[in-house]
């Protein structure tokens, strides 16, 4: 009986340590159509008072544009300033700015981002939303999403240390997506921001002898 009690206490201690690591390390994840989706990189910036939050992995990228970086609830819908955009592994583009087709839903889909902690250095919060394609016929849904202490800056921030090969793969995907849009397109800002983040990660992971990557970052400006 004592051995069982000791084993239980040992396991409890391990679980407690695991939870502490999980909730004290910057990260970004959620359930995409009820399957776990986790970002391998993320970046937050504040421009003109608006919070722009980008997260992605080798295949997909998510972007939030919120009207402020302050704590509070931000609604995501086809009539709100704040919005969420998502590009999946098939390059299908979804946005909470797109209303559903009446054949799909007669009611507006309203998601939300709740910022629970905000400092000059990072933001923490939760999110849920359903985003639609431009024609309103297809959707992607996220629930139980959370982001923890995402650093706010103009540079690279990543929850994990990427190898040069991983960063190069991310950059190739981001460049391919960015090359398909032009200034003025609906998805230009989203893909531009993802491309800048991938460039900054490549600089951090691979170096940038000669400054070629940084020159591209500088040329992209604020992606507007």
Image (spheres, rainbow, N blue to C red):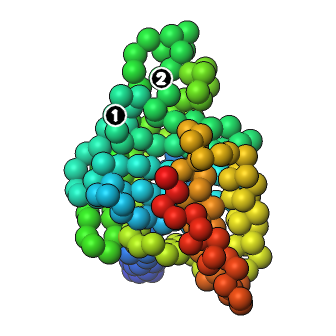
**Residue found 70% across the figure and 65% down from its top:** 170
Mark 2 and mark 1: Cα distance apart in space: 11 Å
Classify residue 143 by image quadrant.
Answer: top left
In the drawing, does residue 44 fall left or right of residue 194?
A: left
Quadrant occupied by the N terminus: bottom left
Residue 116 visible at all: no
The image position of residue 206, as x and y in percent, is 70, 84
Q: Residue at x 23, y 58 (%)?
A: 70
For numbered disc 2, what is the local secondary structure? loop
Q: Could you tell me residue 105's position as x and y percent? A: 48, 15
Residue 6: percent from the left, percent from the top? 41, 80
Q: On screen, 123 above or below 184?
A: below
**Is 95 in front, or is 57?**
95
Q: Quick one: SS at disc 1? A: loop
Residue at image point 55% right, 9% down? 103
Where 104 falls versus 19 (above or below)?
above
Q: Is residue 159 left or right of residue 76?
A: right
Task: Residue at 25%, 45% (x, y): give it.
Answer: 73
Q: Nearer the viewer, residue 35 or 97?
A: 97
Rendered view: 56 above or below 210: above
Q: Which residue is mark 2?
A: 99
Other residues around mark 2 within 10 Å, as few (<14) / some (14–19) / many (≥20): many
- The residue tagged 1 is 80
**Among numbered discs 2 and 1, the one appearing first in the sequence:** 1
Picture coordinates of residue 86, whole percent (x, y): 57, 44
Q: Quadrant of residue 39?
A: bottom right
């Amino acid at each position: 009986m004592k051995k069982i009690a000791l084993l239980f206490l040992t396991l409890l201690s391990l679980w407690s340590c695991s939870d502490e690591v999980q909730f004290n390390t910057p990260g970004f994840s959620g359930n995409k159509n009820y399957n776990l989706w986790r970002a391998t990189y993320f970046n937050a910036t504040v421009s003109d008072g608006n919070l722009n939050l980008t997260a992605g992995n080798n295949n997909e990228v998510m972007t939030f544009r919120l009207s402020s970086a302050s704590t509070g609830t931000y609604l995501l819908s086809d009539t709100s300033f704040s919005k969420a955009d998502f590009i999946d592994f098939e390059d299908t583009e979804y946005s909470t700015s797109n209303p559903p087709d009446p054949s799909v839903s007669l009611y507006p889909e309203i998601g939300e981002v709740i910022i629970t902690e905000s400092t000059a250095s990072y933001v923490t919060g939760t999110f849920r939303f359903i985003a639609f394609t431009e024609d309103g016929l297809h959707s992607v849904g996220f629930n139980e999403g959370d982001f923890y202490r995402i650093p706010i800056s103009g540079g690279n921030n990543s929850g994990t240390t990427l190898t040069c090969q991983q960063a190069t793969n991310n950059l190739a995907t981001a460049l391919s997506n960015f090359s398909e849009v032009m200034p003025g397109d609906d998805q230009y800002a989203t893909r531009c921001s993802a491309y800048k983040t991938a460039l900054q990660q490549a600089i951090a992971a691979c170096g940038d002898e000669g400054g070629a990557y940084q020159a591209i970052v500088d040329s992209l400006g604020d992606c507007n």
